[in-house]
Amino acid sequence: MEIFLEGMVILNSLLVWYLLLHHTESIFTLANFTGNLSISFKIDGMGMIFGGLVSALWPLATLYAFEYMAKEEHEKVFFLFYTMTYGITLGISMAANLLTMYFFYELLTLVTVPLVMHTLTREAILASRKYLYYSLGGAAFAFIGLIFVIIYGSTTNFVLGGVLDLEKIGDRVNVLLLIYVIAFMGFGVKAAVCPFNSWLPDAGVAPTPVTALLHAVAVVKSGAFAIIRLTYYSFGTEFLKGTWAQNVVMAVVLFTIVYGCSRAVKETHLKRRLAYSTISNLSYILFGVTIMTPAGLVGACSHLVFHAVMKITSFFCAGAVMYRTDRSYVHELDGMGYKMPCVFGIFTLSSLALMGVPGLTGFVSKWNLASAAVESGNILAYLGIACLLISALLTAIYMLTIVVRAFFPNKEFDMGSLDGIRDPGWKMLVPLFIFSIVIVIFGLHSANIVKFFDSVAMGIR
Amino acid sequence: MQYMILSVFFPVVSGLYLLVKKEMGNRKNLLISTGSFLVITAVLAILALCLTGEGLFTLFCVTERLPILFKVDEVSVVFLAMTIIVFLCAGLFSFEYMKHEEKEKRYYGFYLIVFGILIALCYAGNLITFYLFFELLTLSSFPLVLHERSREAVMAGLKYLFYSLCGAYMALFGLYFVERYGNTLTFSVGGVISDQAFSNHGEILLLVAFFMILGFSVKAGMFPMHAWLPTAHPVAPAPASAVLSAVIVKAGVLALVRVVYFIFGTSFLKGSWVQTVWLTLSLLTVFMGSMLAYREPVLKKRLAYSTVSQVSYILFGLAVMDGDAVTGSLLHVLCHGFIKAALFLCAGAIIFKTGKTKVPELRGIGKEMPVLMVCYTFISLGLIGIPPTGGFISKWYLAQGSLKSGIPVFDWLGPAILLVSALLTAGYLLPVTIQGFFPGENYDYKVLQKKEPSPFMIVPILILTILSVMIGLFPEGIIRYLSQMIGKIV
């Protein structure tokens, strides 16, 4: 079964990459409802970024999951839903209009609930219920935004620069701004924006491949992706920039950046700590979005891609530790660096990248975000840079304390208690090594990929 | 060009090799390989200085606007010379000292990596390259601090790490703005920011300059971000404390030289509130560091507080932004580097031989280790600033520059505080000598034993002592070299 599944996933990824590289400008309509409502697909620059990212990560995550899931039960059910999620995420990335995206967005919630529930413990069931309610509630708010865009927009298709028809709006500008804020927060539930973030750490009870791929990349970044679509491709930055709505969403996002980090510092459970770190980092992306300039979009895209790689790496490392030793709290990791050198070496690399040490990917995306903020000249955005840096310091605190524990245990610590622990097998190590190579290569040379993001933000692709 | 890159990568790679390699059975092999790595690095670095001409060497580009590039100028020569000498001496010293520590291989591994990164910092040709190696310096030097892995050492290591990162991020805040408003990030004489940007965004640029100065001075231990230094330096093994206190804090000084004189330019900062605040903070640190050192009984801690105070002499000179004061600062970089390294090595030799750490316990130490204590006395005199030692010349220039700068209040207040602090320096360094050689009449001479340390320990201390005195005796060459360069940047 494993070979068949891995083969299918790789085949699908190849297909997706072929499509991305040879796409046409035309829209493919699957089904037509009344009027201008339709389920239709189109590949544009933004979709290429998200689709390309997801299809690059999925085969590796599946490979990792084979080894990890060997210890758990109901493998078949797990892989069923795991692979279905792949298709639905691609659906979000290739959606040509708001309705299609909304459709897949709801499906994504429904398909991933069984994955969160997988272990069927009481904790898992509660977490998945919470996840379901939060996501559906958020989607309902987003739906309000959808309706307003359909009514006041000239088309529901995504167009860079927005589709709102100013004549239709007339003097109801403030109503629409309010609706934007509501829809932003609605989609923001999946992107774990501050008051709606508590589902994400709880959902960490899911098996690690789920937490790593879905709760650091596919699901949460669908939220961020949806907000990019909403802001840049539906409402349009012309309409939003400089209004109170921009200030409100930016303030919320900045608060989330600092809040997520400070919670991560306090958290002692390794996976929950990483989940809080995800909350903060997702808001980096949204910070880029709320700057509402092309440069801001470039920053958002680069963090969308680079954070995905960095965070999936650190989650996979955490998963490898849990798989080998059943230890999941930070204070249980003393001296492990000597027993699992590969895993903790890579974990160190991903920590440095998340902190934003130059030469690794995290620096590049923070650089793009901050220079967009400087360029925008917005005072709140200047404050945002300060938030980014405070958060970088907190990131150093919550990541490097783990590294120090693992490599420099106290003098009195008895290394004998770690006997028998060793690095995991190749199915786990291969994805980790590939990700760490990616982190270093894009950190050292990111000119090409940033140029691509530039062309997307300028609307050339 | 190739020597420059080799002298950076060779120590880093050989350090990593030592870290990854399996434990060596024979201690001698480890020492021989470490020693040869150190010497080869030094030779490569000197070759790089001699054979590299003017001009920029781009290593690679992170993005189009962010090249990683190296160049050599006079400032790099000064800092590099100090770094190489101190690293070789402290390395030789550790061959003996590290006998009584565990995990020697890891120590030498990180020691070499830090060496390479410091060399790279001296070569850094633009702000982004500098920042890259500045962060790497923090990350590779904190294992030296927590080497002993006692609870205290680990906490001190983390404190050092987070303070330094906090400073680095403050500087990064400025870096974003400099990239936006500057013509280039490459260090250029007189600054890189155009007059137009200054007139349009003057206020925000001043704020940014302030953040960068404050951020980089964390490494140099300036008030209010000095607290890590007296915690972190003493817990490290003595040779590591020596390089931390003598060289690594100077990375912060180098950063400030680069930022103030090669990025913002003195014409913009002179007379602004940033200069006033910076002067105030540095003078406060000079005074406070000396006071704290004066009442500290543990010798290594006392030396660490002394570093806090002495490095702020250098910062004061830089903040005055006058030709003579900057000459004094750069001279003090050299003097303080040699002197403080030698002092920490002395303290290490005492701990190694007797296990004593507190000053009151050191009665009669001069009878037990005469050569060591004579060296200690000479370098103490140098740090106090008594002619004809190096410390005198540098402080002379600092005071002269400050007096003729004409900054209201600070022009006389600065030299006054320097003098008070010199007095305090005598007060905290000389008691060791006095009690060491003249233990008093009720002292029991029978317990005395000859404990003179081995040549591995004495020779490096001797070299550093001689160098610090030589600077005082024959300063003309260095001063001529420095003032030529300083004429251009101030």
Image: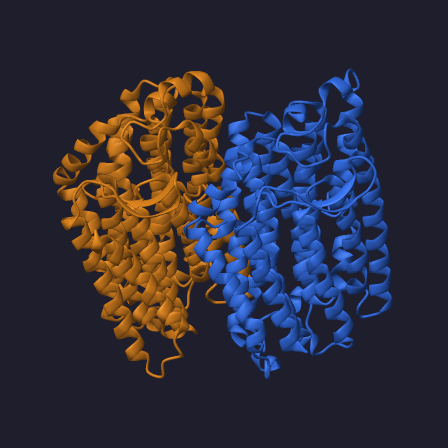
Q: Count every numbered label the image shows and give the total.
A: 0
Q: Position of residue B5 (x, y in %)?
A: 26, 55
Compared to residue B468, the image places residue B146 above or below, namely: below
Q: Residue at x 29, y 64 (%)?
A: B91
Chain B colour? orange
Q: Position of residue A388 (x, y in %)?
A: 58, 41
Q: Is residue B181 visible?
A: yes
Q: Nearer the viewer, residue A60 or A410?
A: A60
* Left or right, residue A33 beside residue B293: right
Q: Nearer the viewer, residue B238 or A426?
A: A426
* Left or right, residue A289 beside residue B123: right
Q: Position of residue B51 (x, y in %)?
A: 14, 50
Compared to residue A153, the image places residue A218 above or below, namely: below
* Left or right, residue A337 beside residue B275: right
Q: Is residue B224 visible?
A: no
Q: Nearer the viewer, residue A272 or A371?
A: A371
* Colour theme: by chain
Quadrant assignment, res B389 = top left
Quadrant the C terminus of chain B occupies: top left
Q: Nearer the viewer, residue B160 or A425?
A: A425
Chain A colour? blue
Quadrant assignment, res B436 = bottom left
* Left or right, residue B64 beside residue A164: left
Q: Position of residue B165 (x, y in %)?
A: 50, 47
